[in-house]
Image (tube, rainbow, N blue to C red):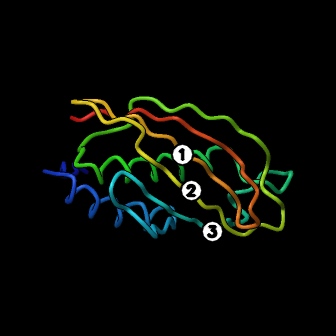
Amino acid sequence: MLRMTPKNSEEAIRMGLEDIGGKYGIRFSRIENGEAEASAPLQPKDRNFYSVPYGAVLFNLADNTAGMAYLSTGGNGVTVSGNVNYLRGADPKADEIHSRAKVIKRGRKLCFISAEVEDNLGNLLSTYSFVFSDI
């Protein structure tokens, strides 16, 4: 199915909120001025055999949160790189993860963003640096 490309950042945020929330259960509590905050429930399917969330689950939340921070600056594009440092696994009792992202530098075409993910018990799980590019 061919998808419509958003014409501007406002349309991209609207489309992203519908898409991301429906697919991954991610809820955004803040998207403004180059910053974004989001959370997602941890389900059994999100955990490995150690009962901690898969790294891909954490990365997905961070990437989507960073993307919304980028869009809030007027950008309209995609992730071109993402680096992660996994610091620890979530507490097995944790039932939600939270992410914060902030634009560090916005250039003409590229946008540099930092992000972090923690569990709902306050454990910092991972840190990220992303680069987004306008299309």
The amino acid marked with disc number 1 is: Ala
Which circle marks residue 99 in the picture?
2
The amino acid marked with disc number 3 is: Pro
- Quarter location, residue 77: top left
**Image coordinates for residue 82, horizontal then vertical, percent:** 50, 33
Q: Residues within 10 Å of mark 1 (few under 14, many from 20)?
A: many
Q: Residues within 10 Å of mark 2 (few under 14, many from 20)?
A: many
In front: 104, or 84? 104
**Image coordinates for residue 119, horizontal then vertical, percent:** 71, 60
Query: Circle 1 is placed at which residue position?
Result: 115
Which circle marks residue 101 in the picture?
none
Query: Circle 3 is placed at which residue position?
Result: 41
- Quarter location, residue 17: bottom left
Q: Which element type, helix, strand or loop, lies under badge 1?
A: strand
Q: Which element type, helix, strand or loop, lies under badge 3?
A: strand
Q: Which element type, helix, strand or loop, lies under badge 2?
A: strand
Q: Tag 1 or tag 3, which sits nearer the N-term?
A: 3
In front: 1, or 126? 126
